[in-house]
Every structure is written in C-alpha cells, then in structure tokens.
Amino acid sequence: IQNSDSEELIVYPNPSSAEINFTINIFGKNQKNELIIYDLVGKKVKAIEVKNSDHLLIRKGNLPNGIYCCTLRNEEKTITTKKLIITE
C-alpha cells in the first residue's frame, strides 16, 4: 500500500473508532468522482459518489476493526490512495 502524502484526500481521525472524516481537495469536481474503501484483500467494502463535495463523514457502521485502503478516483484514473485504520 502506497500511502500518498498528497493533500487531495485527508482522512481523520486515523485511527478511528466511530466516525471518519474525509476532506477532498481536487479540481474537476464536475467529473464523476468516487471514494472507494477496500479491505486488505482487495474487496470493495464501501463506495461513495463524491458530488461537488469537499467533505464526507462516514460512520464506522458494520466495518470490522482492521486496515483499509481509501481510494479517490475520477472517471479516468486513481487520484490518490490513503490508509485507514479502524479500531474499537
């Protein structure tokens, strides 16, 4: 997992136990952008369409404790990938 230091996607708090905030700083917000959360075996566990939004709040819900990859994509490419840790 390459954890980019770019500021296109900021994930906090990280580790998280209840709610996860995503701050999204990208150009081309009129494109179809998507935030996808994968577990470590590559299974997509959540996908959220980002519509002209700079901030998303996701509740832990039924995500088990563990390490996840959060990928921000547009229609053409992966913009960035960040690591997310879910704890009790």
Image: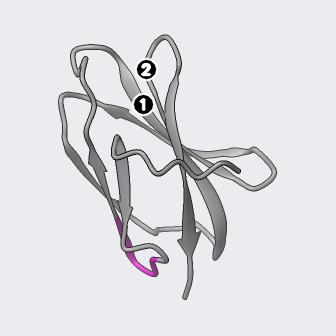
> Residue 39 lies in what quarter of the image?
bottom right
Question: Disc 1 residue type?
Answer: Glu
From the top left corner, tell me how far across and down residue 73 is, in percent.
47, 27
**17 lies above or below 3:** below
Residue located beneath label 2 in the image: 74
Question: Disc 2 residue type?
Answer: Asn
Q: Is residue 71 visible?
A: no
Q: Is residue 83 visible?
A: yes
Q: Judge from the rendering whether residue 21 lies leftward or rightward of residue 83; answer left or right.
A: left
Q: CA distance from mark 1 to mark 2?
A: 6 Å
Q: Secondary structure at mark 2?
A: loop
Neighbours of disc 1 within 10 Å: few (<14), some (14-19), many (20+): some
> Residue 62 lies in what quarter of the image?
bottom right
Span colored in magenta: 16-20
Neighbours of disc 2 within 10 Å: few (<14), some (14-19), many (20+): some
Residue at 43% across, 20% down: 74
